[in-house]
Image (spheres, grey):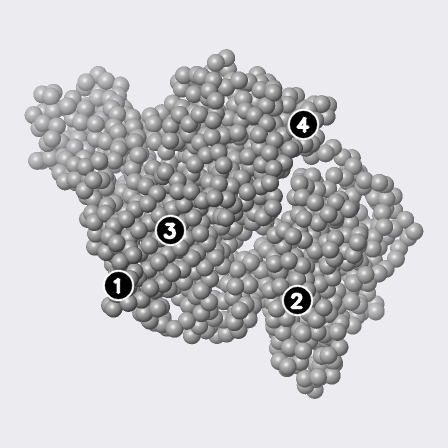
Amino acid sequence: MKPFDYVRPATVAEAVAAGAQPGAAYLAAGTNLLDLMKGGVSRPDRLVDVTRLEGLDRIECLADGSVRIGALVRNADLAHDAEFAKSYPAVAEALLSGASAQLRNAATVGGNLLQRTRCAYFYDTASRCNKREAGSGCDARAGENRTHAVLGWSESCIATHPSDFCVPLVALDAIVEIEGRNGRREIALDELHRLPGDTPERESALEPGDLIVAVRLPAAARGFATHARYLKVRERTSYAFAVVSAAAALQVKNGKVTEARLALGGVAAKPWRARAAEDVLKGVAPDAAAFQEAARRALADAKPSGDNAFKIELGRRIVVRALTLAAAGTPARMPALPASPFASISGAIHV
Amino acid sequence: MSELSLTSAPAHLRHGSNIGQPLTRRDGILKVRGQATYAADNHPPGMLFAVMAVSSIARGRVTSLDVAAAKRHPGVVEIMTSSHKPQLAIDPEIKTNPFVFRMEVLQSDEVRYPNQPIAVVIAETLEAATEGAALLAPRYETLPARVGLDAGESFVPPVVGVGNPTENRRGDVEAGLVAADKRIEVTYETPPQYHNAMEPHAIVAAWDGDNLSIDMPTQGLFLSRARVAELFGMAPEKIHIRSPFLGGGFGSKGLMAGPQVLGIMAAKLVAKPVKLVLRREQMYGPVGHRAPTRQRLRVGTDGEGRLTALDHHARTVSSTFDDFYEPAADASHTLYASPAIRTSHDAVRVDTGTPLFMRAPGEATGSIALESAIDEMAWAWGIDPLAFRLRNYAEVEPITGRPFSSKALRACYEQGAARFGWAKRSLQPRQMRDDAGLLVGWGMGTATFPALMFQAEARAAIRRDGTGAMEIGAHDMGQGAWTALAQIAADGLGLDVDRVAFKAGTSDLPDAGIAGGSAHTATAGAAIHNAGAAVIAKLADLATGDERSPLFGAGNAGVIARDGKLLRRDDESRGESYADILARAGLGEVEARGTGAPNPAAMEEYAMHAHGAVFAEVKVDPDLGQIRVSRMVGAFAAGRIVNPHLVKSQLFGGMIWGMSFALHEEAITDRRSGRIMNANLGEYHIPVNADVPPLDVITVEEHDPHVNALGIKGVGEIGITGSAGAVANAVWHATGVRVRRFPIKIEELLTQR
């Protein structure tokens, strides 16, 4: 591994100063970064270890009814926080469907947002990858790409964002709090990840030194607690990235949908909010026809980037199912095998 | 020999107090406590770390390496390249025997597959060696890679597997097809797969003058030692290999591989002990894999649904520089009676590391295709798949006409089907749903694996204190040899297992042969059994020839050994302890050797196979196509079961592997570069706990007087066969979609709803 400096700042301000240096990378749990470094995909000169920063590991309910999740909160701790899981069940379900128990115990909220694509050509340093090395080309485009993007991709890059957590977050209008060289700012999570366009090497709206310090879910997001699900189709029952996933959240009054939220995972370089689909659900009965129409709208702009046309049809079916599950109501307890088509709400809890 | 039974030779008369007992593995506590020392756990003083640089291209030549940059890196000690390395005594391209495969040990600049070693960096730390390897920044002259089953002109290899004929015929297949009432012609594909043992290949090599000490996981201590000896031009006795534990081998650790030879060369170059451990992705190249296959089956049946012809052709690949051909079609030799059978193979050469034995080589790939085709034919007739198999039950080995040494397959079918509840299966597919609306499918497959034996020797001793010793260079890959062989040793010596010092796992012990072919327990067990008999016979001679002994005059055939005593066969109240016999004789111990080997006469006369029947239930989401196996039952007849506990675990492991074959495993190869794009355990999928359903294993009683004196057939590989097909057939039964390319993928099942 390339030798690197290791610094452990005492304050967020020190971290930002250190992180703004060329060649610096923030280190939290390292569940993704260390693999990238071992593979020579990332070769930072300096690791800025943010794990000891004070105050970033809290889950706080704010006066306005929103919840603020510190960037260093562990995925498992967040998912198993009873109050959080009750208020944002789809987020908890998504968290528990990701990775393995060991990884969830280590991985952090901030790191999850910034995890890199699982595109094999990005990881394989012998392959051309515009994301890894700007302008080098994309070997995925004509390569082994059955799991690649069907939405928002470009000729430069067909990679997907692999996060489960981000999918319900973006559906629920999560806000990202960022500390940077010019102080603190906030952006919608939907604005954090960029589509590739001609510059797939620029993956997010973050500038050098920017440190995600928290994610906030607005008060309104609680309103979906009784009708919110995450559904993830994968190639084995656990410990696999989504082929396609969806988060669906509804508010239903008097037999009509009053609010709908829908986002897809595994289909694009960012968690994909499907606003057009949400629009058609508003004011209609939560029935199969409405869900089919929402699915059609959600994938209307989708096109295959390779051997992955099936993901478009699969995406539609997942949307219908996720909405159906959401309409049926959030289960009283977290299913065994969260987010799985094989989720069962009876029997032992094992995630 | 074929008449030999355990009770007909009095010296062997035992009460079987050890064999047959479900002992827990004797090395289990060591492993749980982290005290079992695997090869890479060794750190001799002064040890350096070696890391391989491997090729990123599939074919061409290395034109430059930045050795200077790597050398400048702090901690780097040496760079071994094709122009700077210890000389070997023989060219590694020379195949000195059929079990020698060509390896890349920096003999040239040529690159013949991705992940081929092209240099070795030796450093004071693993990190420095790793970075040194990255700094070499190789440049290449690249030629187009040849990838896949259609990469070039096909040819018919001279043999497949280990010396199997490429083609076998019995009867007239074409006539059988013409005469058939129903015919199907179906083609199945299986992907390249990699062994992926949990423990990567590793070596710690230390030279002491012209002696060489090696810590290395191996399934073949003596083949490895012989290979090292010839490569380094030294006497085998100067080489000491320790391999007490393996974290899985599955065939990839059977023979000396290039990377391990590089570790020895590196130690020689720097004159210090060196450790070399493969990174996970480096295991996708120089240490073997299971080649992909495309198998065409043509099956004909008469008006009663009996086979008239079975034609099984398999296309596979080998490397461009060596020969190993997955003998997939041979799976059709043994299971189903047909007056006409033809099996044949052809191959193309691709830019890959040479394929090799991988758990059930040929049997696994061939089984999933054959069992699928049989299922398809059963459906063509509208007959229950089990009834169809019974209708075509082979009373003699179909390809040879030889009788079976034993075959309890009918009992396997019966007991497995009963336990599973097979009788309630709907004949039509896509008829069954569970409470949650998931599609439910039931499928089955027949399991088969040959009962093989190799050559082995063991040394037995009985000591003055009444304890015994048994020594054999046997291998525990995790299957439980430390326990099962000790049980056989205990019975061989007429002692409780705790009174026997059992030694294994090092090359200074007698040669146990290779731990492969599901033959290790039978082969090493036979040697142990015979060594035990021989040492008991010596002890009996001492006693029966001594007039002071209560056994005097009994004749050694009139004595039996039990619980540390020799007893008169005609009067068991008269006997003498081992300790007393040795004390009176003034001896510290008696020792003897025994060998285990196949019996050529019996092999000529009989077909020897283990059999089984596997039943699987899968659930499939009708809209989303995701599959989950929900239960499996396997009933296996594999001769004598030495340790039911360990055997069950072996069969579980095989069944899980079979499920993995049907649903998960695939090395994804870039069609242009030949590089494997999922060379890691995150994305090369094998089942995780949540994929493994409740498994039920039945061991069906089977007595085989012909396979070997102990009646052991072996259980290491059979669990895969049958299981893969059972899962694939269950997916069809659940969905009505017949998928013929494995592993079965979600998109294949989205065609219906």
Q: Position of residue B589 (x, y in %)?
A: 26, 21
**Measuring 56% from the left and 25% from the top, which residue is drawn there?**
B108
Label 3 amino acid?
His
Q: How much space separates mark 3 and mark 1, taking CA atoms?
A: 20 Å
Q: Which residue is mark 4?
A: B65
Give whichever of discs 3 and 1 has the lower sequence position.
1
Q: Residue A35 in the image: state x and y as whole percent.
A: 66, 43
Do tag 2 and tag 3 residues touch (Cβ < 8 Å)? no
Q: Nearer the viewer, residue B123 or A17?
A: B123
Would residue B83 be seen by someone viewing this image from the given angle? yes
Residue B70: quadrant of the picture: top right
For image coordinates 36% across by 38% down, the residue present is B158
Gap between marks 1 and 4 measured at Cα? 65 Å
Q: Residue at x 78, y 72 (%)?
A: A220
**Marks 1 and 2 share the same chain:** no
Dot 4: element? loop
Mark 4 or mark 3: whose residue is earlier in sequence: 4
The residue marked by circle 3 belongs to what chain? B
The quarter of the picture where residue B177 lies is bottom left
User: SS class of the residue under badge 3?
Assistant: strand
Q: Which residue is mark 1?
A: B179
Label 3 crowding class (10 Å Cα cut-off): few <14, some 14-19, many 20+? many
Q: Looking at the rendering, which quadrant does residue B603 occupy? A: top left
Along the horizontal axis of the image, is B543 left or right of B618? Answer: left
The residue under label 3 is B313
Q: Could you tell me which quadrant the C terminus of chain A lies in?
A: bottom right
Which of pointers 1 and 4 indicates the residue nearer the eye? 1
Q: Which mark is residue A246?
A: 2
- Between A200 and B213, which is closer to the camera in this rendering? A200
